[in-house]
Amino acid sequence: MDPSEIGVPRDLEQLLTDRLAPAFETVAGVPVDPVVRRSHRADFQSDAALALARRLGRPPRAIAAEVLDRADLADLCTAAEVSGPGFLNLTVADEALAGLVAALATDPRLGVPVAAEPETIVVDYSAPNVAKEMHVGHLRSTVIGDAAARLLKWLGHRVLRANHLVDWGTPFGMLIEHLIDLGEAEAAQELSMGDLDYHSHNPGRPGRGNRLREERSPRRPLSRDLVSGLEQLAPGPSPRSPTGPPPGGAAVAFR
């Protein structure tokens, strides 16, 4: 294999396609896609001879054999043979694989090209409800979402990470009221995140969280007033902004 050919790492299917395409064009008289794909009988196979048989009025095996005679595959394949009705079975040489791996090792981008037309992409992930206890589902969304964001950034896109913390107003207003009633010292000993979870999946289950909901429900209007006061002290955009993809961009959500 020509060292200059692997100066920039490329995939094997593309290399084989580039080697077979001139031979198919010579045999057919017009440009032909070699249709190279993975094979169960070899590393790769080409099916293009089958499609050319009717157009050229020749047996597909004869077309495939002539293509093999004309294709430059000596340094890329250890075996190249006609199989079945006219398939080209190709087995890649170990030396060719080693050359490609060596080229990947010296490439700072590991063979991954930068996107020709970078986009602005919003990735919405994690999104824990700050008024509830966290669970393993938040880890799943966070890990998958962050991996997607990193991959998109590596490809050269402008990535906007969005983390919507869900509506927190009433639960925190209720908590503030309860803290005022209990006093700081006692509240530090008594309260946990479970006391905020007024959207319990088992509303009939006895527990401190449900008792707190029952006790604080009559004072929800006051809780809302407290939250409104907090918002006036620190006005700003909603934590859910941006709500959708920017112009010319895309949005991906992991929940």
Image (tube, rainbow, N blue to C red):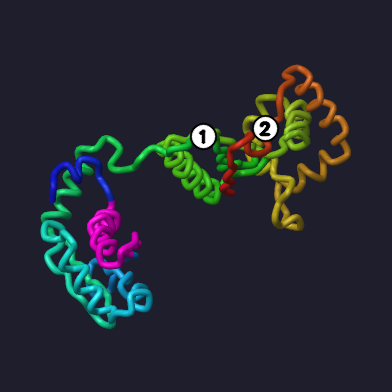
Identity of the residue drawn at 67% across and 29% down: 186
Residue 115 is inside the magenta segment: no
Observer-nearest of 65 and 92: 65
55, above or below 162, in the image: below
- Residue range highlighted in magenta: 11-34
The image position of residue 78, as x and y in percent, is 12, 65
Residue 21 is inside the magenta segment: yes
Q: Amino acid at mark 2?
A: Ser
240, above or below 228, in the image: below
Gap between marks 1 and 2, in whole Å?
14 Å
Identity of the residue drawn at 59% across and 49% down: 255
161, above or below 201, in the image: above
Examine the image and state in which quarter residue 71 appears: bottom left
User: What residue is pinned by disc 1?
Assistant: 159
- Residue 241, numbered circle: 2
142, above or below 88, in the image: above
Q: Is residue 130 left or right of residue 86?
A: right
Observer-nearest of 57 and 21: 57
Identity of the residue drawn at 39% across and 37% down: 114
- Residue 46, numbered circle: none
Q: Is residue 150 left or right of residue 8?
A: right
Query: Callout 2: helix, strand or loop?
Result: loop
Classed neighbour count for the residue bearing mark 1: other residues with Cα under 10 Å, few (<14), some (14–19), many (≥20): many
